[in-house]
Image: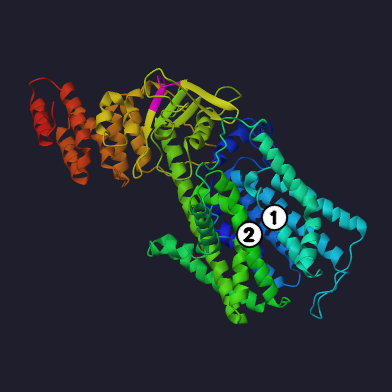
Amino acid sequence: MFLTVTIVAYGLLLPLTGFYWDDLPFAWIAEFLGPWEFIAAFAKVRPFLGPIFFVTTSLIPPVPLYWQIFALVIRFLSGLCAWFALNQIWPRHKRQTLIASLLFLVFPGYSQHWVAFTHINQEWIPFIFYLLSFGFSARTLRSSLAPSGVAPRRHEDEAQPTRQSPPRATRNTIYALLLLIAGVFPTEYFVSIEPIRFLFIWVIVSEQVNGFRQRFVESLKRWAPYLLIWLANGAWLAYFYTIGGYDSLYEVEVIKQPLTLLRIVSTMGDVLWKAGVYVWMQVLVLASRALAAPTTLATLGLIAVAFILIAFYLRRLNLSEAETGTFAVSAIVIGLAGILLGRIPSFAAGLPLTLQSSYDRFMVSMMLGGSLFVAGLIELFVRNSRLKTYVCALLIALGIGQQFFNANIFRRDWAKQQEIYWQLAWRIPAMKPNTALLTHQMPIDYETDLSFTAPINWMYAPQYQRSDLPYALFYTEKRLGGGALPSLEKGTKIGLPIRRVSFHGSTSQAITIFMPRNGCLRVLDPARGDEITYGKQSRFLVDAIPLSDLSNILVDTDRTAQLPFLSEPEHTWCYYFAKAELARQQGDWEQVIALIDQAGELGYEPEDPFEWLTYIEAQALTGDIEVAEKISANAFKQDNGIRRGLCEVWKRVQAQGPVGSEVETRVDDILSKFECTR
């Protein structure tokens, strides 16, 4: 069941997903600097995380498909580990622990599964260690307590627990302690959830020990070894992030606002609502915004099918089930505690908890608590067995639907990334080393300029060996005024790091590019008035246009830059447009016309009217004023915002035409028609 749910929730679109966020820099490091580089790269940030990256990157090549498959395996294992742990804590509630584990597996508040290279290493592998640690500590405790005190009531067919031999009990304790170290030291995501173990221990101790004080003392005594490791980790973090070796480039943010009672209550209410309630209906809210969209219909269809199959499976499942009241109360209490404790690290860092964004990665530390909370609520309030089955099946199906919905978002993002990479390669087949690409931002959600810098170096410097990075992409909107991009004045020194290597360049050697949300990638050129043509775009883009120097593009080459794991797509409009722009850069107007005409014959045309400007100029300069004028008029009808661009084109045509000729008169009329001032 776990494998089937994992594949349906996370695997249906797996071949269509790729690399996101820090995946690309990490993949570039693995390819060009090798697995050992991660040890040094994380030494001043998360020193115990480097070995995990070293092991996984030694085994898995930096290819998106391989990492997405690996992520699928890890999520499957995480579900099994959660089931193992919960079964050790509540062995008499197998049905409830199965439900809680399946809810954990598809927990819909966490959408970052597909950022596989980053989050599998950074969170999920340590989390698996932590879950196993819970399980082994519960196994040891339950076995050691079973023979003493009053034995709990059992079904006739349930085996009596037996005391473990001392060596085996010791081994399990050692496993639990070592797994705790492996789970908590590599990353701070789980630094606050250790008190959940105390509550798990309390559940087990309560079955054998009477009285609050006795239970508390016994639970604390059993928790003590784990508490010591937890406190040691806290001391290490306090040292490392203050006077230790923490890299000052990664500033430690802490909450600066006063912790008023109102703020604390508001934060608690927000996280309990989001992680405990809203996430389970989130997919329905998202789907309602575009009910007729293909993605929505596919998601709703998958939810319906999953509900039927899961309900059928749970109805036929014959698992022993003890009285549910004790499980329900303890699951709700531990779930609430787990949600609140899991929020502490991100709250202390002053980071928001927004769903359907990269910030919902902080939900990973609340997933176990959120799943137990909901499982407990179902047990407490839904008494009818058949109805309980349907409610559980529906929630699991909704989780599956949410993850499929998320997969579609990442699928589209990866498709857009590939468009950008290939259009960049077609338009800029090669670049002079030490060139910076400037743009205000890309129309894409899961990448930054640092994310793009890695594949750009992969594309244009495939023989790279450790040295300064030869290329970088700068988001001017994000970087301007900071250390990376102090200003857009010519001659300004700029730089961008990828862990332990950096790009060092100057605004005097730059190319400004523009990728519209609908349309093709463009290299902007101040020599043809693009500062005016695109004057209504963001000032962060427009102000960078004067720095764009097209001589940094190497046109006399038969090589096309590309990423090794991407196959070239079908040549549609943007391919012909990119090649036409490259021909325009070389002054080959006949080639421009030939390429655009070929695209038209194949049935392709631009989404963005601005992409007609090069063709208009080519037709006008080769003598076909009538065709150029007709296309200009049509483009203006599509988008009157193109007027400035049309004026710039026709002014250049006028400047290059013969003085006093009939052509000049015709061009004057066209300039007047579009209300262009000289």
Look at 59% across and 71% down and name the residue there.
377
Image mark count: 2
Q: Is residue 514 left or right of residue 568?
A: left
The residue beneath circle 1 is 195
The residue beneath circle 2 is 337
Place of residue 465 in the rendered image (x, y in percent of width and height, measured from the top left): 61, 24
Looking at marks 2 and 1 on the same chain, the residue that comes earlier in the sequence is marked by: 1
> Compared with residue 102, is residue 650 higher up or lower down, i.e. above or below?
above
Q: Are marks 2 and 1 in contact (CB under 8 Å)?
A: yes
Q: Is residue 187 left or right of residue 352?
A: right
Foreground residue, 591 or 367?
367
Secondary structure found at label 1: helix
The colour mode here is rainbow
Q: Is residue 555 visible?
A: no
Foreground residue, 196 or 2?
196
Number of residues whose C-alpha sits closer than 10 Å to that of mark 1, classed few (under 14), some (14–19) or many (20 or more): some
Secondary structure found at label 2: helix
Q: Please tell me whether residue 37 belongs to the stretch shown in magenta.
A: no
Q: Is residue 244 left or right of residue 288?
A: right
Look at 47% across and 27% down and name the residue there.
484
Q: CA distance from mark 2 to mark 1?
A: 9 Å
Q: Is residue 277 left or right of residue 604?
A: right
Look at label 2 and name its amino acid.
Ala
Place of residue 136 in the rendered image (x, y in percent of width and height, measured from the top left): 79, 57
Look at 59% across and 67% down and name the residue there.
374
Place of residue 176 in the rendered image (x, y in percent of width and height, measured from the top left): 79, 53
**Residue stretch in magenta:** 506-511
